[in-house]
Image (cartoon, rainbow, N blue to C red):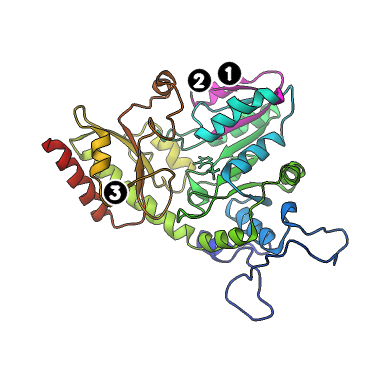
Amino acid sequence: MDKKYKGINTICTHAGELEDTKFKGAVSPLYMATSYAFEEVEVKRYPRYFNTPNQVALAKKMAALEHGEAALIFGSGMAAVSTALLSHVQSGDHVVFQNTLYGGTSNLITEEFDKFKIEYSFTKDASPAAFEAEIRENTKLVYIETPSNPLLTITDVSAVAQLAKKKGLVSMIDNTFASPVNQNPIDLGIDIVIHSATKYMGGHSDILAGVVISSEDKINTVFQMAKNLGGNLSDYTVWLLERSLKTMGLRVKAQNENAQVLAEYLYANNKVAKVYYPGLTSHPEHELAKAQMKGFGGMLSFELIEGLNADEFQKKLQLIKSSMSLAGVESTILSPSKTSHGLLTPEERAKQGIKDGLLRFSVGIEEPEDLIADIEQALKAISEN
Ligand SMILES: *Cc1c(COP(=O)(O)O)cnc(C)c1O
């Protein structure tokens, strides 16, 4: 990091920015070149080497956001997850994964790891004891995701980080759901932080990207494989992502506030059976969330009472769109059993506590009154049938 900025919004707006020395423009200039003259002979500047001016500038902002030393920007969240994982383990090694993971990450493990003879196990639950129970002689890495998708369970980040340190393992977290605004795992002792930048970092449902943030040393290990796998992000999108990040602090704060209002509204609604949101005192890990997070995030899930059909409810919503993905400025809703977790067997879903009627709600920046009015009218419409 060039300069040490303290406040999140200063980091979002300014950290890493490129100066336009020629025209004094207000924003970082965009350099689209794929070929650079050998000015400094040692440095071969090339987009797949993650070292173009815009890639380097954005990586500085990312490192500053997560209080790390260095970062690499990838073409998708999964490119970041797969490269970070595969660069830190090899055949014969074992990895402990949290039981509840993003669907794409689960698929990467169950569909690809056998081919590389990388062993793995999933924890029974997200408690530190459950992680310890899975550690074997050849375990090299522990991987967590908190808050989890879709039930917003909270893993004790510093307890797992301490366990990994004690056992000499690398610790990795997918921090996508929290965003760097709400949770900074490196401060809690985690080695490597991953984000799908498609979500809160992009924030407008128009960028696919990922990022890995860590120490110089570990980022260099990731880089050695990343340049061979070729998962970099195009410079134009790097530039767009820098633009998106300038408002991330403001957006996420608004989403935190809205999600709290909506969670409390749903919790008090007699047509709603259950609400999963770490900001509610009824959430089993509310105190833990309060201790390790700066905000409770914009994601929540809920179940309607028996007799009210979740599919019909989704169809009646007008402002809140039924759609895949999450974390945009617009509110969206989906049914995990039919979408994000549709590939799991009904038994696997039941084991994770994902009921067929569960709805996952990504709360946007709209006025909460309008969101509540939309839910009210949809509940009314399906109750009259
Ligand atoms: C979306 C997502 C990913 C994957 O990111 P892509 O950008 O879609 O490749 C990984 N982890 C979590 C928690 C996500 O929500």
Residue in the image at 57% along x and 44% along y: 77
User: Looking at the picture, which amino acid does disc 3 mark?
Assistant: Val
Please give the label number shown on residue 133.
Answer: 1
Residue in the image at 39% along x and 36% along y: 286
Q: Is residue 335 left or right of residue 76?
A: left
Residue 278 versus residue 8 in the image, above or below: above
Q: Secondary structure at mark 3?
A: helix
Is residue 210 among what the camera can see?
yes
The residues bearing labels 2 and 3 have C-alpha atoms spaced at a distance of 32 Å
Residue 265 versus residue 5 in the image, above or below: above
User: Looking at the picture, which amino acid does disc 1 mark?
Assistant: Ala
Query: Mark 3 = which residue?
Result: 261
Compare marks 3 and 1 and give the one earlier in the sequence: 1
Q: Is mark 3 within 8 Å of ligand 1?
A: no
The answer to which image quadrant residue 235 occupies is: bottom right
Query: Mark 2 = which residue?
Result: 124
Compare marks 1 and 2 and give the one earlier in the sequence: 2
Residue 262 within the segment the image draws in magenta:
no
Residue 120 within the segment the image draws in magenta:
yes
User: Looking at the picture, which amino acid does disc 2 mark?
Assistant: Lys
**Which residues lie in the magenta part?**
116-144
- Is the C terminus in the top left, top right, bottom left or bottom right quadrant? top left
Q: Dots 3 and 1: beta carbons under 8 Å?
A: no
The residues bearing labels 1 and 2 have C-alpha atoms spaced at a distance of 9 Å
Q: Pick whichever, 175 or 307, lies toward us.
A: 307
The residues bearing labels 3 and 1 have C-alpha atoms spaced at a distance of 38 Å
Near mark 1 (Cα within 10 A), the count class, few <14, some 14-19 or many ≥20, is: few
Residue in the image at 42% along x and 29% along y: 342
Place of residue 155 in the rendered image (x, y in percent of width and height, measured from the top left): 49, 33
Please give the label number shown on residue 78.
Answer: none
Place of residue 113 in the rendered image (x, y in percent of width and height, measured from the top left): 65, 26
